[in-house]
Image (tube, rainbow, N blue to C red):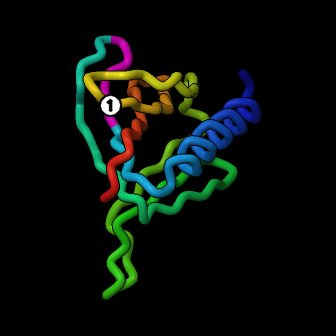
Amino acid sequence: MGFIDVKEKVIKTLDGFLDRNKRYAVELYISNAITKSGIGRIFITSDRTYNTDDEKFILKWNKDETYDVRYNDFSIPYDEVLTCYEEDEKEDKLKIAETAVVILKNGMEFDFECVGIKI
């Protein structure tokens, strides 16, 4: 895939996933794509906003109304993306999850998962 194709795929995949789940929190699981070992987990609240530019997809959340400052900011540079896709809904012990996956060339995997939690 060329740069334009990757950029369009990332925007289409994450935009669709975040829009469908806009009323719910999203869990972001960060792991090593090769060994599948977990690195971290982040809760992204429903007050999130996202935008794109020529170089990256930018996601922000947890806005403090008092100071009008965003404390959480996460971006995905298009030129670092190896693949991006959505997984079908999967059922895991009474919960059904929808997942969008982004894997970077350096082996980092980002799984955006929504199970309907409102935070």
Q: Quadrant of the N terminus?
A: top right
What amino acid type should be assigned to the residue bearing mark 1? Lys
**Residue 46 % position (x, y):** 41, 59
The chief SS type of the magenta part is strand
Of 20 and 110, nearer the camera is 20
Residue 102 sits above or below residue 77 on the image: above
Kindly state the secondary structure of the residue where label 1 is placed: strand
Say how many tags the image has. Answer: 1
Indicate whether 65 appears above or below 49.
below
89 in the magenta segment: no
Question: How far across and down, in percent of the image, does residue 77 sit?
Answer: 55, 42
Residue identifier under label 1 = 95
Camera-nearest residue between 60 and 75: 60
In this picture, residue 40 sits left or right of residue 64: left
Residue at (41%, 53%) from the top-left corner?
Answer: 24
| Quadrant, the C terminus | bottom left
Q: Is residue 79 left or right of residue 116?
A: right
Crowd tier of the residue under label 1, counting other residues whose Cα lies within 10 Å: few below 14, some 14–19, many 20 or above: few
Q: Quadrant of residue 17?
A: top right
Say if 53 sits above or below 68 in the image.
above
Q: Residue furthest front?
A: 94
Q: Give the residue displayed 76% in from the left and 35% down from the top.
A: 4
In the rendered image, residue 93, in percent from the top left (x then y), is placed at 26, 23
Residue range (magenta): 29-34
| Residue drawn at the location 37% of the way across and 39% of the way down | 115
* 87, 73: nearer the viewer: 87
Report the residue that reaches farthest toward the top.
35
* Residue at screen point 52% across, 54% down: 58
